[in-house]
Amino acid sequence: MKYKRILLKLSGEALMGDRQYGIDPARLAEYADEIKQIHDQGVQIAIVIGGGNIFRGVAGAANGMDRVQGDYMGMLATVINGMALQGALEDKGMLTRLQTALKIEAIAEPYIKRRAVRHLEKGRIVIFGAGTGNPYFTTDTAAVLRGVEIHADVILKGTRVDGIYTADPEKDASATKYESLSFADVISKGLNVMDSTAFTLSQENELPIVVFDMNKKGNLTKICAGENIGTVVNV
Ligand code: UDP
């Protein structure tokens, strides 16, 4: 396998499947199958999951809610998703740990880097919940932060599109896909890969990002095996 330790970032919206809100159990089970394939190959897997299928602080603020209050609600939404994913992975026989940036000791371990790494070495899948634990950040930033901390080889950002395009392929039919980009290319071309905090953190720490379609079966395994799937952003 090309990648021995990965940080998989899944958006909350990815868990909705065809629904408008919440979690689709069938989609969760599909993701668990994909993750099991690489787990069986010995890849060490850490996962950061978003919360956009349940709540986003900015959306609350747009409706008059205090932004910080809303962001903590968003962080709790990621814990709900993390628990759902944990259940789906354990249903398929994988051992997991949920570690959260906000302490919720009845259901999750507090985030402790050394412990997280030990779990990974023992073959347990570690899900990081509650983002960075701070308002005004995103789970993309949490993914890069945790990825850097645990010395992941790569950030695998699973999305609905199969890579980074010259323009939004859902809006512009003439958009073409990049196979690879440098961090500098992404900035000079004004491409939107992750929010700027997440992107800068990745660039400064030379942690590559692969943007790929998580809904296409087998993609995750192919990427870990070294196939050119999606778009890779590297130094
Ligand atoms: N959030 C936060 N700090 C973090 C991570 C997340 O405040 O470190 C909040 C924020 O309100 C965000 C929500 O949690 O909108 C859900 O995360 P995100 O929008 O990144 O989820 P995704 O878009 O990946 O589903």
Image (spheres, rainbow, N blue to C red):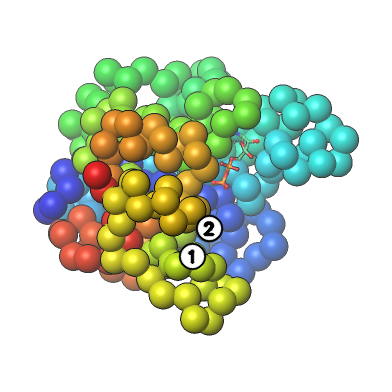
Crowding at mark 2 (Cα within 10 Å: few <14, some 14-19, many 20+): many
Viewer-nearest residue: 50 or 82: 50
Outermost residue on the bottom side: it is: 173
Task: Look at mark 1 in the image and give the residue it sits on.
Answer: 160
Which residue appears at 56% of the width and 65% of the height? 17
- Name the secondary structure under disc 2: helix
Residue 94 in percent (x, y) is at: 30, 46
| The label number, if any, that marks residue 220 in the structure image | none
Q: Is residue 152 left or right of residue 102?
A: left
Ligand 1 within 8 Å of disc 2? The answer is yes
Q: Is residue 137 above or below residue 220?
A: above
Q: Is residue 129 left or right of residue 80?
A: left
Q: Nearer the viewer, mark 2 or mark 1?
A: 1
- Name the secondary structure under disc 1: loop
Task: Look at mark 2 in the image and give the residue it sits on.
Answer: 14
**Splitting the image into 4 quarters, where does residue 145 fall?**
top left
Residue 79 in percent (x, y) is at: 55, 35
The C terminus is located in which quarter? top left
Which residue appears at 67% of the width and 31% of the height? 71
Q: Is residue 94 left or right of residue 88?
A: left
Check whether the beta carbons of the residues at disc 2 and disc 1 lie within 8 A of each other. Answer: yes
Residue 34 in percent (x, y) is at: 32, 60
Q: Could you tell me how far apart the alpha carbons at marks 2 and 1 are, in whole angstroms? A: 7 Å
Counting the numbered discs, the total is: 2
Which residue appears at 35% of the width and 53% of the height? 185
- Along the polypeptide, which appears first: circle 2 or circle 1? 2
The answer to whether residue 34 of the structure is visible from this angle is: no
